[in-house]
Structures are given as C-alpha cells and as structure tokens.
Image: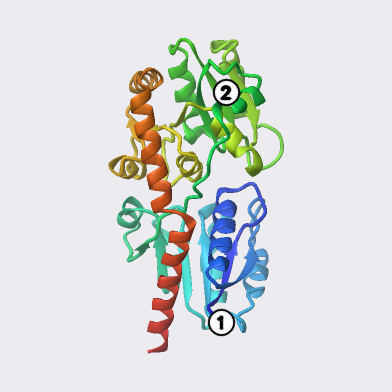
Amino acid sequence: MGLKIAILTPFAQRCGIASYSRDLCNALAEQGVDVYVVRTPRLGVKTVELLTDVAERVPFKKVDLIHVQHEYGLFQGLEESFYRILKLYEKPIVSTMHAIGNFIIDPIIADNSNLLITHNKFCKKKLGHPSKIIPHGCKPTKCQPSKESKMAYAIPPEVSIVGYCGFISPYKGLDLLIEAMEKVPNAALLVGGGWHAGPDTQYITRLKERSLTSLEGRCQWIGYVPDEMLSTAYGAMDIVCYGSKISTESGALLMALSHGKATIASSIAPFREKEKARALITFKNVKDLRRKIKKLLKDEDARKELEAGARAYAEANSWDVVSKMHIEAYEELLEKSDL
C-alpha cells in the first residue's frame, strides 16, 4: 500500500498558498502518493463552525497523516479549536508554516503538530520551535521569446522592460519600483497582478494613477496573469523586481526565477539567502534599486549571469525535488509514530 495523505489547504483560488498546494499535490501524486485535498476557505470571516466543518471532512480512515497548509488569515485566531478536532483522529499532523512571527498562535501550532515545516533558515530561526526546512518548490519553465512576448503587449521589441508580476498590496513594495523607474530613462515598466478577488483595491488604483502620471507613456498594467500567460508576461520582461518590505517567502519571486529571469529583490533575510545562492541580487533602498536596474539594462553579461543563476536555483529546488523531500519527511514521521 502506498502513502496516503490529507492536505488541508485553499484550492482553485487566486491565492499563493493555493498555487503552492496545487503544485505540491501534483508532484506528490507523480511520486505515487494518494493525496486527498480538504479545501479550506481563503476569503471571508472564519468561525469555529466553519473550521469544524473543514476538520470533519478529513477522510481519516483512508489516510496515514494530515498535512495542514497554515497561514494566519486562513484561521483568524481559531487554530486551537481547529487543531483540537484534528487531534481526535489520532493521526500524525504536519503543519507547513507559510508565515511565522505570531507569538500566540505559533506555539499552539507547534504543540499540536508532530512536524513543522518551514521554507528557509530565516523562518526556522524566527519560529523558535523545531522544524524541518523544505524549500518552496519551483517549476522550471521556458519563457516565450522576448520579441513575441513584447509584441503580445504591443511593446516595441527594442524597448527595455522592467517588470513585476504577483499580488499587489502595500507590503509588496511596488511603490519603490515605481519611484526607482521615474529616473530610469529609455526603459518601461510592465506590471502584472492584482488582488485575490474582485476589482482593484483602492491601493492598486492609487498606484496606477501615480505610475501612469510619473511614467507617462512607459508603464503598462496587464492585470492578473493566468498560468497560461506567465511565460509570455515574463518573456516580455528583461529584469524583474520584487521590493517586498516583509516576507517569509515569495511564490511570485520564485516564479520569476523559475522562468530564468534576472531578478532584483529587497534586502530582507529570505531573499538574501537566495542572493548567497547566486539566484538574484538585492537592493537596500530606492537609489540602490535604480542603480542596479540601470546596470543590468546596460550590462548583458551581468544579466545573463543572473539568468543562469535563477535557472540553476529553480532546477535545484524543483517540485520533483521538493516532493521527494516531503515524502522522506512523511515516512520518517510515520516510522517514529509506529515505535
């Protein structure tokens, strides 16, 4: 009999954790694991009754263990009630911590899980509880050629493009990129992304108004980019920038690396780890970001070196590799549970 697991996660929604879980589930299935997805709601107010319903839908008689994809907004402080129900199944519980730093909630998850998974050294250290580092997976993907990609967005092939693609909120730092680009001549900004649901937020509207004024004639917003258009969007970008002011990990940034893009990211701990792996470079402030954008646009060799580093990182942390790391962790946990 093969390994059977239940994964509790948002699914089929505009959500980074949903995308992560979809790719993990597919990769595990390719390794022969039977995966049962128990869908947790991404948006809206959570109640004990709602989360009780989620927990009670776990097919505990069919699975060997339960794997929770955890992020604070998914549970809204109701973790204790939720995990208490899960523990009634008497199955090992694994929790992947997609965010860390809540000193009330984190101990509750640690006390009620048999294994915690974090994505990098920064998260492991800050969590303050024993955890296993399993990197966020990557999906190495070949971009559509630059000329065709730019033409798809009515951009002349000779125009240098600096890009961003991902969800847009104040902590993502897109305002820093817009400010930097205001003094980068002979280059344009391409912005892909939006919010999880519905029309633009007030914040996105304000950013659009600012960018379309300060970067008049050289800024284009293309909205949420579906999976089938990612290779075109990234193909149109010569450089990709992520200015996140806080982050534990970034699926959007990893998507840029997966497409082999020269990437500049803010100098925060999770991104500095990738800089040490030569997957990207970081910036300290707007002036530094502007300087590095200009350098990469002019220096093709430096850009190609970063592109090679991005592809190498993506291959080393592909979903195939990451799924095998999960299976090893599952089997080790089940072996301990049998003792």
Residue under the image location 71 percent in, 34 percent down: 199
Residue 251 lies, with reference to residue 295, above or below; the image says below
Q: Position of residue 306 (x, y in %)?
A: 36, 34
Q: Quadrant of residue 271 in the image?
A: top left
Q: Position of residue 85 (x, y in %)?
A: 57, 75
- Residue 207's disc number: 2
Q: Position of residue 281 (x, y in %)?
A: 34, 33
Tell me which numbered mark, 2 or 1, is placed earlier along the sequence.
1
> Which numbered dot is residue 114?
none
Query: As shown in the figure, which amino acid type bears the numbered disc 1?
Result: Tyr
Return the residue at label 1: 89
Label 2 environment density (alpha carbons within 10 Å; few <14, some 14–19, many ≥20): some
Q: Is residue 282 left or right of residue 146?
A: left
Is residue 255 visible to us here? yes
Query: Is residue 95 positioned above or below 196 on the image?
Result: below
- Name the quarter where the N terminus is drawn: bottom right
Density class for disc 1 (Cα within 10 Å; few <14, some 14-19, many ≥20) is some
Q: Position of residue 182 (x, y in %)?
A: 47, 13
| Foreground of the two, 300 or 103 | 300
Structural distance between the alpha carbons of marks 2 and 1: 48 Å
List the single residue furthest toward the left.
276
Regarding residue 248, the answer to whether it shows in the image is no
